[in-house]
Image: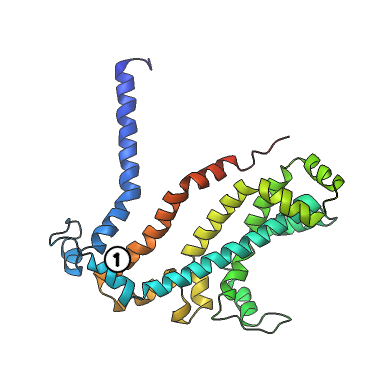
């Protein structure tokens, strides 16, 4: 078949447009419907789920969701959970990857194998033991329930992030470390002044993965944060569904969905650049 013929090019163009429209409808369609339901009355959503605002836009649903559902409180809790998880997650990933890939102690291969092995263990298997550990932390005999530490600490110990950092640090030319040591830089100075600046691409990738995981996590915060005043959005909204008007609840869901979308759109250039340049360091 001649790819230069007008018929073939027209068919390829039409097929591409069909695929593009299908992707837009599949990805943006649910979000648009959620916005429609969030700005409609409960009666309209139940009676005419696909009608476009028979009685007009009801922006008051968004205002009421913020006040009556206490969305502001749950959003604050979510931000605390995400920021803490991000900070401790990066701390563990960068230091762990630095130790395995750069410092390379004699037992580095054993630790790397052990960390890799944990990726093959389903999280639900360790759920009970992890919960018992949080209830009574060994050596300290402290109960972390109803504290954000119960969410931050387990989430920060991500074997995937440690291995991802380790692989990136291994790609950094060894000559840079040798030159830094010749100049008198110690392990901490090499980590802070050399490794971290070079690791900005992978730091962006790990940050994005960590923040998304913390924002949407449901089961673990539900177990360790039974106090409603401390629960994030992912836990609080399902709890208040039965006692909230449908239109107001849809408005709260829309706000919770649109926040990460807007953040990604605002920083998409940085995220995509970081993902594209990760591992690009060469000799």
Residue 227 image position (x, y, % from top left): 47, 82
Q: Residue at x 33, y 67 (%)?
A: 252
| SS at badge 1 | helix
In the rendered view, tell whether residue 23 sits above or below residue 209.
Answer: above
Quarter location, residue 39: bottom left
Residue 100, can we see it? Answer: no
Residue with the mark numbered 1: 251
From the image, which quarter does the N terminus lie in?
A: top left
Q: Residue at x 31, y 77 (%)?
A: 68
Query: Residue 194 location in percent, x, y?
Result: 73, 48
Residue in view at x 46 percent, y 75 percent:
231
Q: Looking at the rendering, in which quadrant would you find the C terminus?
A: top right
Give the residue drawn at x 65%, y 51%: 164
Q: Is residue 39 left or right of residue 233?
A: left
The answer to whether one can see residue 251 in this image is: yes
Question: Which residue appears farthest toward the left when viewing the image?
Answer: 55
Image spot of residue 125 (x, y percent):
60, 68
* The quadrant where residue 281 appears: top right
| 172, 188: nearer the viewer | 188
Q: Position of residue 88 (x, y in %)?
A: 63, 65
């Amino acid at each position: 078949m001649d790819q230069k013929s007008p018929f073939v090019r027209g068919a390829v163009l039409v097929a591409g447009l069909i695929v593009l429209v299908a992707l837009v409808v599949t990805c943006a369609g649910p979000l648009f419907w959620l916005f429609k339901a969030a700005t409609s009355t409960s009666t309209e959503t139940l009676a005419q789920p696909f009608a476009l605002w028979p009685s007009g836009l009801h922006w008051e649903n968004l205002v009421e969701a913020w006040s009556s559902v206490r969305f502001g409180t749950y959003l604050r809790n979510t931000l605390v959970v995400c920021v803490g998880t991000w900070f401790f997650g990066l701390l563990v990933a960068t230091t762990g990857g630095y130790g395995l890939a750069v410092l390379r102690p004699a037992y580095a291969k054993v630790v790397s194998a052990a960390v890799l092995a944990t990726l093959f263990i389903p999280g639900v298997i360790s759920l009970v033991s992890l919960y018992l550990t949080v209830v009574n932390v060994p050596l300290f005999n402290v109960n972390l329930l109803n504290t954000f530490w119960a969410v931050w600490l387990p989430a920060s110990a991500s074997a995937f992030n440690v291995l991802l950092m380790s692989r990136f640090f291994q790609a950094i030319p060894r000559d840079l470390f040798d030159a830094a040591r010749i100049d008198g830089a110690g392990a901490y100075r090499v980590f802070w002044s050399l490794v971290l600046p070079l690791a900005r691409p992978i730091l962006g990738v790990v940050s994005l993965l960590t923040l998304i995981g913390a924002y949407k996590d449901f089961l673990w915060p539900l177990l360790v944060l039974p106090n409603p005043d401390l629960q994030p959005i992912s836990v609080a909204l399902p709890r208040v569904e039965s006692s909230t008007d449908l239109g107001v609840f849809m408005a709260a869901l829309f706000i919770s969905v649109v926040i990460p979308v807007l953040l990604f759109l605002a920083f998409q250039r940085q995220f995509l650049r970081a993902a594209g340049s990760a591992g690009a360091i060469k000799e």
